[in-house]
Amino acid sequence: MKLYYFPSPNPQKIRFALNELGLQCEDVPIDLARGEQRTPEFLALNPYGRVPVLVDGDLTLWESHAILAYLGEKTGKLWPTTAAGRADALRWLFFLTSSISPPTTEVVFNRIAVKLSGGTPDEAAIARGERALPGPLGVLERHLAKHKWILGADFSLADCDYGPTLNVLDKAGVSLAQFPQVRAYLDAIRARRAWQETPKLPGV
């Protein structure tokens, strides 16, 4: 397998999962700052020009949630074995995409990515993102008050999805003080060896 990779949250989800699953996979670096995601060679893999992309034999797969579900189905590990369980996992993946990731992106892009590229942060976007985050984080807080991990008692690929997003949100300076369960959950993610071995941007 090959993983086309840049150390931002969505590719980190896949590298984190691969580490947890113990799968051998070659990382192919894609430098977003140099526009390597827009080359004809990369666009032949993902016409939308985004990482991650996983190549496994004849399969070329993009979209991080699709890749996580594929790895779970392929290995039969860290992924529910029943239809109801898989639906629950997908529910939490979709919740992250629809409700947590958009405001997180507004904050993180303008507090971290823009500064790295020498641009000017959009303060209105940061404020909009910060206003939108307490609602979905509150849902996650109440869920984690009853469950150790996203799907219950056991770590799963759903946690590989949430960890990188919450990590970069924290690194962007969003306080989790009013969400102690989310804070403890992030600390538990960070303590895992597979996360510690996942490549990151300096300071992120």
Image (cartoon, rainbow, N blue to C red):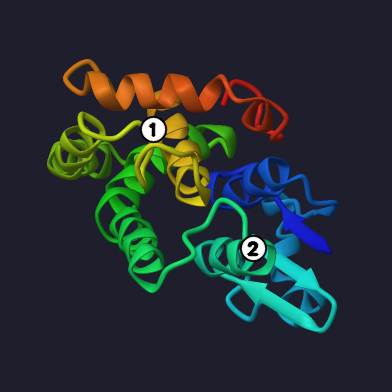
> Which SS class for mark 2?
helix
| Residue under pointer 2 | 71
Q: Residue at x 45, y 39 (%)?
A: 154
Q: Which mark identifies residue 66?
A: none
Can I make out residue 119 in this image? no
Dot 1 amino acid type: Leu
Q: Nearer the viewer, residue 91 or 37?
A: 91
Mark 1 Cα-neighbour bin, 10 Å: few <14, some 14–19, many ≥20 = many
Q: Nearer the viewer, residue 192 or 96?
A: 192
Q: Pointers 2 and 1 in contact (CB under 8 A)?
A: no
**Location of residue 198 in the rendering, given as x and y in whole percent from the top left corner:** 69, 35
Question: Residue furthest toward the front?
Answer: 82
**Location of residue 138 in the rendering, given as x and y in whole percent from the top left corner:** 15, 36
- Quadrant where the image shows the N terminus: bottom right
Q: Residue at x 47, y 60 (%)?
A: 80
Q: Against 135, is 36 above or below?
A: below
Q: Residue at x 46, y 30 (%)?
A: 167
Q: Quadrant of residue 200?
A: top right
**Location of residue 137 in the rendering, given as x and y in whole percent from the top left corner:** 21, 38
| Residue under pointer 1 | 169
Q: Against 6, is 189 above or below?
A: above
**Location of residue 145 in the rendering, given as x and y in whole percent from the top left corner:** 20, 29
Q: Is residue 93 left or right of residue 132?
A: right
- Quadrant where the image shows the C terminus: top right
Q: Is residue 34 left or right of residue 171?
A: right
Disc 2 versus disc 1: nearer the observer = 2
> Which SS class for mark 1?
helix
Q: Quadrant of residue 9?
A: top right
Dot 2 amino acid type: Leu
